Image (cartoon, coloured by chain):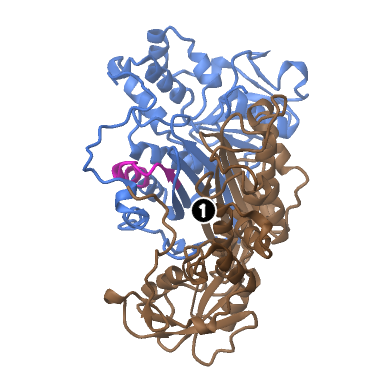
Chain colours: A brown, B blue
Amino acid sequence: MGRPAIETARPQQDDDDPTVASVGEFAVIGRAVEGRRQPPTTLLGPGDDAAVVRTPDGRAAVSADMLVEHRHFRLDWSTPEQVGRKAVAQNGADIAAMGGRPSAFLVSLGCPADTPLAVAAGISDGLGSAAEALGAGVVGGDLVQADQIVVSVTVLGDLEGRDPVLRSGAREGDVVAVAGAIGRSAAGLALLLADVGSSAPGAAELIDAHRVPSPPYEQGVAAAIAGASAMTDVSDGLVADLGHIAAASGVRIRIERSRIEPAPALLEAARDLDRDPWEWILAGGEDHALAATFPPGTDVPDGWSVIGEVVSGTAGGGGSVLVDGRPWAASGGWQSFDAG
Amino acid sequence: MGRPAIETARPQQDDDDPTVASVGEFAVIGRAVEGRRQPPTTLLGPGDDAAVVRTPDGRAAVSADMLVEHRHFRLDWSTPEQVGRKAVAQNGADIAAMGGRPSAFLVSLGCPADTPLAVAAGISDGLGSAAEALGAGVVGGDLVQADQIVVSVTVLGDLEGRDPVLRSGAREGDVVAVAGAIGRSAAGLALLLADVGSSAPGAAELIDAHRVPSPPYEQGVAAAIAGASAMTDVSDGLVADLGHIAAASGVRIRIERSRIEPAPALLEAARDLDRDPWEWILAGGEDHALAATFPPGTDVPDGWSVIGEVVSGTAGGGGSVLVDGRPWAASGGWQSFDAG
């Protein structure tokens, strides 16, 4: 933390340390593959023209995300292994948000020729161990030269015979609930940007949450089984992502701040940085918590907190998500591109 | 063709032309999605946290490839639409090489904020139309800001109940055969590098083959049905890719140049550029033809040409692929990374 946050800062590297180019593509891939356990759903693992994965109910849920160095991660803030684990969390949460379980990942890595082997190997170790912890395999991918590090992940998931939980199923009268931590990743990012590091008590856990989010995977399955009418993961920010459900469902959503209890570490960090913790809770992305709606009378599963309800009407000028009865006017969710 | 091959050359752009950043992520994705037909195998298309794809036999063949601007394509040599079509061919060939049919593609695009909308839209149009021609859907992906254009594609394929055709099944006595054009992409690249353009007769078709390879998709299925013992696509070069089969199968492969008839355009281009056409045929990558082995006595399907046979032994010092009885000493296949 102590050193200046230069965009190009990297862990120090001796001239003799191996790079991706010095050991070659096949050695890097070989190192990423060897010793990794494949789950029983992997019928054919890496090494041929394609892998073959079991899809027991005759369907595959699929999603893809791309992480770019300096934009989605920084190697002076995160270890390569954390970058790999974050990529799995981000993609796995998309499957959880459909009510499924991640079963296989494909990972394409672009990086400069002088990228230390330890960086490429660290990213693939993080991916591999995080996938393994989910009972999923890393079954394929690509490794190519690029000007900056780009990690592109595709995930396949198993819906286990259930209907996918779409964003479009929310109906007037449904309750709105969340599972998992919200605002922690944004608070951790703010701490990193302020360069106060883990000196503030409680800050370390927020910074860890930014480096590697912990999606509540099991809660996605539990919500689907309980009959959730709509679900998404909180990647762009709570209000923005509830807005996606509202827009897809043609409804409005009201949430109450009094029903959300900010974590003590979040309040502490907000005090230390003189920030409004609700900015992080309502607009902070990348937590990969889950947000869902349930029909009235549903026995909302343990681990979910009801924070509001679905009401009639569509966006109009006022926005489709009301916080304490009012449109919430803040900077809004994550933007993929800088203003042009 | 006439202008100098400057790495950063791009089609001219007015300041007023829309860019990816000026129209925003969601508009670019919306434009890529609208009007695209999804095949019946796409149960849920783009727009939710994940897509859902049918996998009728309870398995999915999956593969991924990443294309990087200036490394795998140049926008002063190819239109954006051609880049998209090439990405589909490259990935689709991996499924054909297993004996399957491509059913769905996921595409993550990284690009600078000032990338013309026409470039991003052209790439996605090329991807979409090429996928549609294969009866496959583009079912998901991502769009993020990056320093250079990166196209990352994952393909899902249907094995239609058949066993996948691996690289490891070649046995002594099998015949070796190829389907599709070989050496044309490398010849087209040589013509582009020599900047002679399409002035030489026949050159245009070679340059087109470099811009958009045409894998013989149906021949992959036909080979699997006929009982091919091993198969791969020719992406790194014929000798290099047969070497992958030989290594995976623990055998050697002998091919004879007399059994390969170079296309007239190839011979003409070699004459014009004072090059050896066998360099292109034996070491040229990116054609995405198919190479397979068949047990002795197999009725090799129409469209396949027998060029050699599988013999016993392993690589040793002499290499695992013999051309006219001798190890073929040339520059070798495509390298993913510049020498470090």
Left or right of B251, for residue A238: left
Q: Which corner quadrant of the image does residue B190 belong to?
A: top left
A36 vs B232: above or below? below
Q: Position of residue B9 (x, y in %)?
A: 33, 27
Which residue is depicted at the point 41% across and 42% down?
Answer: B111
Crowd rating for badge 1 (residues with CA inside 10 Å; few <14, some 14–19, many 20+): many
Work out whether residue B175 or residue B157 is closer to the camera in this orientation and state it.
B157
For the record, the magenta segment spans B109-124
- Residue lying furthest bottom in this view? A297
Q: Residue at x 68, y 31 (%)?
A: A13
Q: Is residue B42 above or below residue B225?
A: below
Q: Please tell me which residue is depicted at 66% across the width and 39% down the height of the picture.
A: A119
Q: Chain of mark 1?
A: A
Judge whether residue B120 is colored magenta.
Answer: yes
Q: Amino acid at mark 1?
A: Asp
Whether the magenta-drawn stretch holds residue B159 is answered as: no
Q: In the rendered image of this protein, does residue A274 appear above or below residue B297? A: below
Name the spot of residue A14 as percent of width and height, x first: 71, 28
Is residue B121 rendered to the left or right of residue A333?
Answer: left
**Residue A228 in the image: x percent, y percent?**
53, 80
In the rendered image, which residue does mark 1 sit on? A65
Q: Is residue B162 visible?
A: no
